[in-house]
Amino acid sequence: MGQTREISCEGITKVYDGNKTALSSIDFAIPAHGIFAVIGRNGAGKTTLARILSTLLEPTSGKATIDGLDVMADANKLRERMAVVPQEGRTVAWMTPVQTVSAYLLWRGISYKESLKRAGEAVARVGLEDQADRLNRTLSGGMKRKVLVAMVLASDSEFIFLDEPSTGLDPISRQQLWRLLIELGKDRFVLLTTHYLEEAERVADRIGILNNGRLMAIGNMPELRGRLEHQYSLKVPAGLDLQVKVGETVDLENGQLQVLTTQDEALRISKNLIEAKAQFSVNPITLDDIFTYTVGSIDAEVREDKEADEE
Ligand SMILES: Nc1ncnc2c1ncn2[C@@H]1O[C@H](COP(=O)(O)OP(=O)(O)O)[C@@H](O)[C@H]1O
Ligand SMILES: [Mg+2]
């Protein structure tokens, strides 16, 4: 009987400098295939977790395994099977995309001829065939990020780690990257960290929510939705008398009122709103709603920073 391959953490804790706890006793086990998105605000511990699982950082305590191999004891074996793009990953300015990918493959022990062949293929697959022989420094931010994705793609690794691959990209580049990520995730394990909740919801098979070094929730979207009592969201302009019988209401910043409720109640209120010819929308709750409910708004600290600046 084939055993399911897993990525697991048992009590993974990381304390930096003896006093700065970045991860507190992280426990989970997930299948080692598909896309696992780790979401959370800045400082939540996403990079720390990604670095521990990709063998780049030792945990202070706890045990993590990938396909039964220990990330510390079996690090060398695992490294042959993984590819990592760190958060600060950059392309070398004076190299071309094909040279960049080929150099990476050479470094991984692949022959020169094979490295060039695979580099050309990977660069084309990420949509950079027209830029294949231009210097990286002449590429846009989105194109440079694609070069990094071409590297992991060309390495044909089983386990891929991408720390905030889409941060700073414009919306179009981001959507192109999402398509690539979905491709990558089809026959591999991809750990992706992001603070774009929409991105996690679009591309991930499983999502882990980190906050202050704690894993608050983990699962696929239906599982995460299942954590909430009310799984429908109704949004209406403020000032309407909805007479909500089940659920809770939230004042949104855009002046709308959000009702989190059951499907039946959403339907009942919707009927009244249709009769009253009011504008409204009704949807299953999004990851954004789940995140807000679980740890508060993802933008809260950004707002706090702004307010502090204004003082
Ligand atoms: N090398 C380090 N030394 C000390 N503290 C660190 C170090 N790296 C990260 N931290 C701290 O650990 C916490 C988690 O950081 P990190 O894993 O980078 O979070 P994220 O990637 O979610 O933004 C933060 O409070 C951060 O300041
Ligand atoms: Mg980070």
Image: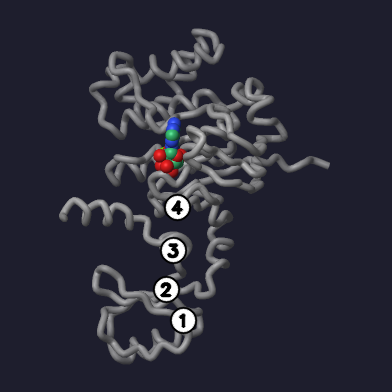
Q: Quadrant of the C terminus?
A: bottom left
Q: Amino acid at mark 2?
A: Ser
Q: Nearer the viewer, mark 3 or mark 4?
A: 3
Q: Amino acid at mark 4?
A: Arg
Cα separation between marks 1 and 4: 27 Å
Q: Specify which label sits upstream in the sequence, 2 or 4.
A: 4
Q: Nearer the viewer, mark 1 or mark 4?
A: 1
Cα separation between marks 3 and 2: 8 Å
In the image, residue 32 sits, relative to residue 235, either above or below, namely above
Q: Can you give x and y, in whole percent of width and height, for residue 121 in the image?
A: 45, 23
Q: Which residue is mark 2?
A: 233
Q: Specify which label sits upstream in the sequence, 3 or 1.
A: 1
Q: Is residue 9 left or right of residue 184?
A: right
Q: Secondary structure at mark 1?
A: loop
**Circle 1 crowding by C-alpha within 10 Å: few under 14, some 14–19, many from 20:** some
Q: Amino acid at mark 1?
A: Gly
The disc placed on residue 286 is 3
Evaluate if marks 3 and 2 touch, with contact meaning CB atoms under 8 Å apart: yes
